[in-house]
Amino acid sequence: MGGGQDSGDGSLCLADTKGPSPILLCPRRYLLRLLFWYRRRMTASTRYTNAPLVYVICQIMHPVAQPLSRGEEAALKQQYAQTLPLADNETRSQLGVGVVSGGAPSAQVVRTDPIVRFSARNRRTAVTFAPEAITLETTKYETWDGFRALLVAVLASRQDVAPVDGVERIGLRYIDEIRVADAGPPGWADWVGPQLLPPQIATPEVLRLGQQQATVQYDTAHPGVQVTLRYGAVNGPTTVGDGPIARPSPPAPGHYFLVDTDVSWTLTPGEETPALVPDDVARRGDLLHSFAKDLFEGMLTDRLRQEVLHAD
């Protein structure tokens, strides 16, 4: 979670919220405190001038709401005029798999949902409204405080104009791509913690690392809160390219270490659905962010901090 410049910026599709993630799933679960250590001297105020964070997304899942009316869209556009003035509409199809005569499976459109997106003028930050979700995403993240303030403002406007009935899930995801200046494949042992390195297996032939992919899911002591970490050495195109959310001048394909941190709170069975109160969502986001920040800091070596990320 390297952050636009904030070491507290985690790296982060919310437990598959959105975006590519070429990672295989490891079914085992571990307690968070058993696998990673946190370097306590790296406080929330530490900043990186060359932070590896490339994408952040926060998604709030809620009970299905009616599509925004034209009047509601106009009211939101007015409220977002200073921050997210560009409005777009699109239709998103939900696909299902059916079986035709003869037993062959076929994809079928199950539902078509209207989507409304409000974007910044540089297209690097946007909020999207779907029938079951409110999503805030950016490729221009600087600090958690700034992102949090925008999240509260976005939710407050929505609740003022067209309120939704509650909150069922909150996800916060950070995607970091750590790149170093080595001419060839990096020796990642110099840059990330030993917990993240591939196993060293003795074989008759020399094996050189090509690609590394892993996913670990952590339980926490907080009901409904889980952390999913996807990580690995990559040799190829960037994980986050240019799309509806712009990423100016994405790097050419090459070597980097992916750290994709996805922290979520999900309503537990039998629990009452809380109202969507923007400040309450933000406070829960503080907890999710703290997990992502601590996990990210526990992965880094001092050499990476000083020589690559340039910690202040």
Image (cartoon, helix red, strand yellow):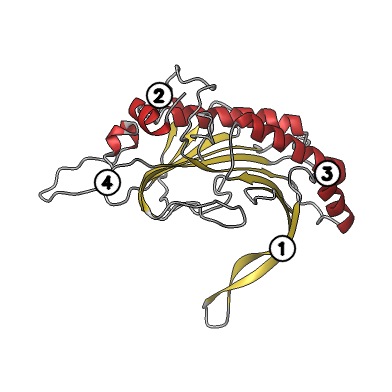
Indicate the amino acid at tag 4.
Answer: Ala
> Dot 1: few (<14), some (14–19), or many (≥20) neighbours within 10 Å?
few
Instruction: Tell us which disc is closer to us: 1 or 4.
Output: 4
Contact, CB < 8 Å: mark 3 with mark 1?
no
- In the rendered structure, which disc, 3 or 2, sits on the residue that comes first in sequence? 2
Contact, CB < 8 Å: mark 1 with mark 2?
no
Contact, CB < 8 Å: mark 1 with mark 4?
no
- In the rendered structure, which disc, 3 or 1, sits on the residue that comes first in sequence? 3
* Residue that extends furthest to the bottom in the rendered view of this protein: 102
Q: Which mark is residue 90?
A: 1
Say whether residue 271 is visible. no
Mark 2, residue position: 37
- In the rendered structure, which disc, 1 or 4, sits on the residue that comes first in sequence? 1
Indicate the amino acid at tag 2.
Answer: Trp
The location of residue 275, given as percent across then percent down, is: 78, 36
Q: CA distance from mark 2 to mark 4?
A: 30 Å
> Dot 4: few (<14), some (14–19), or many (≥20) neighbours within 10 Å?
few
> Dot 3: few (<14), some (14–19), or many (≥20) neighbours within 10 Å?
some
Mark 3, residue position: 79
- In the rendered structure, which disc, 4 or 3, sits on the residue that comes first in sequence? 3
Q: CA distance from mark 1 to mark 4?
A: 43 Å
The location of residue 206, given as percent across then percent down, is: 14, 49
Mark 4, residue position: 183
- Front-most of residues 106 and 93: 93
* Residue that extends furthest to the top in the rendered view of this protein: 41
State left or right for residue 134 relative to residue 139: right
The quadrant in which residue 311 appears is top left
